Amino acid sequence: MIVLGIESSCDETSAAIVSENKKILSNVILSQIADHAPYGGVVPEIAARAHLDHLDRLISEALACAQVNFSGLSGVAATGGPGLIGGVIVGVMTAKAIALARGLPFLAINHLEGHALSVRLTSDIEWPYLLLLVSGGHCQLLLVERVGQYRRLGTTIDDAVGEAFDKAAKLLGLGYPGGPALERAARAAVAPERFALPRPMVGRPGCDFSFSGLKTALGRCAAGCPQPLSAIDAADLAAGFQEAVADALVDRTGRALALARIAAPQCRTLVVAGGVAANQCIRTRLEALAQRAGWRFEAPPLALCTDNAAMIAWAGIERLRLGEQDRLDFAPRPRWPLDPTAPRAPGAGVKA
Ligand code: KG4
Ligand code: ZN
C-alpha cells in the first residue's frame, strides 16, 4: 500500500509518499516562513495563495523523488481540517481531483490525528498510549485508544503552547517563528532563575493548561530590564520562560499519567507530538517524567514533529487498511475536535 499525503493547513505546503511498511519514500516540505515573517505571524490569505501556487509542483516532486507515478498509488490523503480554511480547501480539492481522475480512494485526515499517529510511522507502538499534543494551535492530553478513538483528558483554557512560544519570542524580539528562535536564545542563558515567572495550573486538579498569564508575566519581567533588552537578559528570560512551560507540561502530564492508569490500566507509553515536541528541553523533561513512572517514552524524530505530509499519508494508510475512505463531497473543516464528546475549552483557538 502506497499513499500520497498532502498537508496545507497552516504555513507549510507539503506532499509525501509513504508505504505501508513504514518507508517515507519522499516528504517534500515548502515553508512559507519568509512570506509571513514581515507580519510576525501567519497571514491566512497569503498562506492560501502560496499553497495554491506551489502544491502541484510539490506533488510532482514527491512522486519523482519516490520514483512512483499516480498508477502506483493506493490512495490520496489530505488534511481535511482543522486549520486555516483557505489552505485546507486547496489541499482537499487537489486530493479529490487526483482521486477522481485516477479512481483512487480519497481520505480526509484530521490534522491532529496526523500528529497523534505520526509516532507509529517511526516506532512500533501498541494501543493505548497517552499523547501530549503540543502545537501552534493546540495543547492537549489525549488517550489514544486506536485509530479514530481519542479520549481527551485535558486541554488549554487559553493559548496553545506553540502560540505562547511564538508570542514570547516576539515580546523578546527574537523573531519568527518563535519556538525554535526562543529555544536557540535560551541556550545562551546565564541565570534564568533570576526572573520570578509563574507555573500556570501547577498543583491544580485536572489536566488542563493555561499559558496567557505566563506570557503576561514575561512581558512584565522584560519591561523591568534596561531597554533595549540586552542579549543576556533576553537569553535569561527565554530560558526562564522555557523552564516554566516545561514545569507546567510535566505537572499536567504527570496527572494525566495517573488518570490514564485508571482509564486504561494496560497503558504504559507516553508520546509527545506536534511542533513544540521539537523542543529539546521539553523532550528531556518529559522523558525523565516517563522514566520516573516506569513508562516508555516516544517522540517522533524532529522533522516529523512540525507540520509535514508524511504524517498525513501515514494516517491515510492507517485508515485505508481498516477499510475506510471518505466521500468526494467531504467539506473542509476549520474546526474538527479529535474527541467530539469533550467539552469545548473557553477561548480555545481553531488553528492546528
Ligand atoms: O505542529 P506545528 O508545525 O504546526 C501546527 O500544527 O500548529 O507547530 C508549530 C508550532 C509553532 O508555534 C512553533 O513556534 C512551535 O511549534 N515550535 C517550537 C519549536 N519548534 C516549533 N516550540 C518550541 N521549541 C521548538 N524547538
Ligand atoms: Zn500541526
Image (spheres, helix red, strand yellow):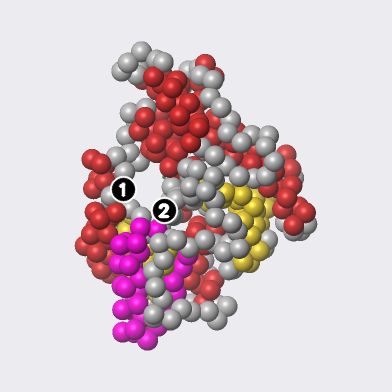
Q: Which residue is mark 1?
A: 42
Image coords of residue 292 (percent x, y): 72, 39
- The residue pinned by badge 2 equals 351
Contact (Cβ within 8 Å) of mark 1 with mark 2: yes
**Compared to 94, does 153 lie above or below?**
above
Q: Which mark is residue 221?
A: none
Q: Predominant secondary structure in magenta? A: helix
Vertical position of residue 10 compared to residue 75: above or below: above
Q: Position of residue 348 (x, y in %)?
A: 48, 49
- Pick whichever, 259 or 26, lies toward us: 259
Amino acid identity at mark 1:
Val
Mark 1 element type: loop
**Region in magenta:** 83-110
Confirm if mark 2 falls within 8 A of ligand 1. yes
- Name the quadrant of the C terminus: bottom left
Horizontal side of 163 relative to 277 (left or right) equals: left
Q: Is residue 104 magenta?
A: yes
